[in-house]
Amino acid sequence: MAKARAIIQNLAVRPERAAAMLDISTSYLWELVKSGKIRPPYRISPRVLLFDVGRLIEDWDAMKADVDASAASNSWDEVLEA
C-alpha cells in the first residue's frame, strides 16, 4: 500500500508542494496561475486543491521554451558586438 501511495502522490500535489517542486514561493505560483502560465489546480473538495503533476511539468517546459526563445533574440547582443 505504501508503494501505491508514493505513486499517487506523484500524480497530484497540493499548492505548497507544487511551488516547492518549482523552487518558487506559493504566492508566485498563484501569480503564474493567474497569468495563465500554469494551469489552475483541481478542487477535489471544498478545502483541497491539487495540481496535476503532468500538467505542471508541461507548463514548466513551455515557460522554459519561452525563456529560451527570448534569450536567442537578445537585442543587447547587437549593441555589444558593435
Image (spheres, helix red, strand yellow):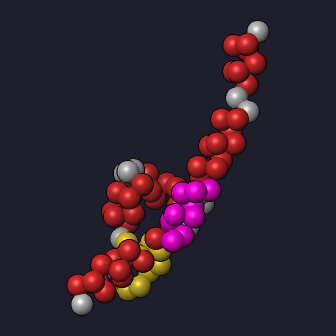
Quadrant of the rendered structure where residue 43 is?
bottom left
Identify whether 48 is placed above or below 20: below
Decide if residue 67 is on the left or right side of residue 29. right
Q: Is residue 55 visible?
A: yes
Q: Which residues are magenta?
A: 54-62
Task: State the count of labels.
Answer: 0
Decide if residue 25 is on the left or right side of residue 64. left
Residue 42 pos. (x, y %)? 47, 78
Q: Residue furthest top?
A: 82
Q: Residue furthest left?
A: 2
Main SS class of the magenta portion in the image = helix
Q: Is residue 41 visible?
A: no
Residue 20 pos. (x, y %)? 34, 57
Q: Residue at x 73, y 25 (%)?
A: 75
Q: Nearer the viewer, residue 46 or 24?
A: 24
Q: In the picture, which quadrant includes the C terminus?
A: top right
Q: Is residue 44 magenta?
A: no
Q: Nearer the viewer, residue 51 or 58?
A: 58
Q: Residue furthest bottom?
A: 1
Residue 52 pos. (x, y %)? 47, 74
Identify whether 55 is placed above or below 24: below
Q: In the picture, which quadrant includes the N terminus?
A: bottom left
Q: Residue at x 39, y 63 (%)?
A: 18
Q: Residue at x 52, y 63 (%)?
A: 57
Quadrant of the rendered structure where residue 9 is?
bottom left
Identify whether 69 is placed above or below 37: above
Identify whether 54 is placed above or below 45: above
Q: Residue at x 54, y 70 (%)?
A: 55
Residue 31 pos. (x, y %)? 49, 54
